[in-house]
Image (cartoon, rainbow, N blue to C red):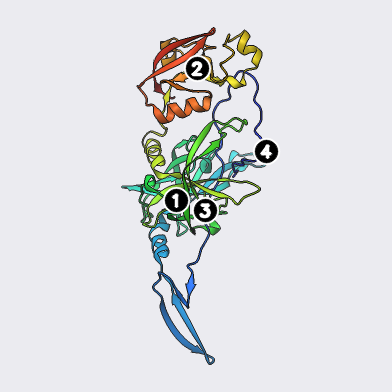
Amino acid sequence: MGYYNSSEPKGNKKGYFASSFTGLLAGALLVGVILPSVTDGEVAGTEPTSTSQAVSGLQTTSSVVTSDVTKVVENTTDAVVGVSNLQVAQQDPFAAQTSEKEQSQEAGVGSGVIYKKDGDTAYVVTNNHVVEGAEKVKVTLSDGTELDAEVLGTDVWTDLAVLKVPAASIKTVAEFGDSSVLQAGEPVIAIGNPLGLQFSGSVTTGVISGTERLVPIDINQDGTEDWQSEVLQTDAAISPGNSGGALINAQGQVIGINSMKIAQSAVEGIGLAIPINTAIPIISDLETQGTVSRPSMGVAILDLAEVPAQYRGNQLNLPAEVEGGIVVQSVVEGSGASTAGLEAYDVIVELDGKPVNSVLELRQYLYNETKVGETLKVKAYRNGELQNFELTLMENS
């Protein structure tokens, strides 16, 4: 599993046509173990149960230590599962039978959270990149039981995926909390499978280091920032395999889905999680319809910054003072943009009265501030003249 590394240089993409937006969100979050502090032989906030016995003249004492953390973990850990990505590996090309040529092998392991049980079916949320490219997906419960899983839907923009599994063996379902009330310094607990199933159910404690952090994401790995993901920052340790695991509060409620890692040479890794309030509507869409409903203008677009300077004046006829904007490459027939009269080579500079300078800004505004069916006011340059358009947003297909 890859990581986002802010020290890596971004490539320059020349030319007119934007790449398709598919790809791999990177990263994963580790879960470790932090023991309660010991003072004068007792653990603060614990309820020790001690027994003593004499062995060869020595007095020994054994204690069963419980704390708020252990109680929360005990009530939640069975809702955190392993998620195995199985892909077909090519075998002997001269084998006579297809079954001999191909065999599913484990391509990666992440984590997931059981969030719902409905009759004979249970539902698991995990990360998109955990199941991406999988031919088959298996879910491993905390007791080692393996279940075949069906991927109901995935969303590359939020790095979320929803699976369904048979519910007969499942007894614990996680409870969602409210990530909007989190404060820096608030204690949190992370549960997952760092480094694979051999470390399943690993636990670490930490605090919320910050909320509403924006992390740049290059969806299709072309060196251009496609999205900014709003995440929670925690000081939990990080390791591959914990992607999709639970970040929970002191009440045992899931307030984040562990997602990715920032790797920098000068600092320790920073743990990040998708806020559960962000995840809930995405989870609902993926569970019920297999995709996320988002508004679309119906245009293929490109950053003006990607267009060589000579073409801005000669072909687009832009005024010299226009330095930012989005070039319309093509318009989908029958779309809102087509009906409104937008054309190829128009340069969009404003949405609903707000300046937009890049594809990223346009996408963030559409996905975060508008809904399907709403009217969008657009200002765009055409042959050097600023024109106004109004279009109806349609569902992104």
Residue 235, numbered label: 3
- Mark in front: 1 vs 4: 1
Q: Which residue is mark 2?
A: 348
- Mark 3: few, some, or many residues within 10 Å (few <14, many ≥20)? some
Above or below — where is 85 with respect to 197? above
Q: Position of residue 181 (x, y in %)?
A: 37, 47
Rounded to the nearest angstrom, the CA distance separating label 4 from label 2 is: 52 Å
The disc labelled 2 sits on which kind of residue? Ile
Which residue is painted at 52% across and 24% down in the image? 359
Do the residues under discs 1 and 4 have CB atoms within 8 angstroms? no
Which residue is painted at 67% across and 38% down in the image? 93
Circle 2 — which element?
A: strand
Rounded to the nearest angstrom, the CA distance separating label 3 from label 2 is: 41 Å
- Mark in front: 4 vs 3: 3
The disc labelled 1 sits on which kind of residue? Ala
- Quadrant of image for the N terminus: top right
Rounded to the nearest angstrom, the CA distance separating label 1 from label 4 is: 56 Å
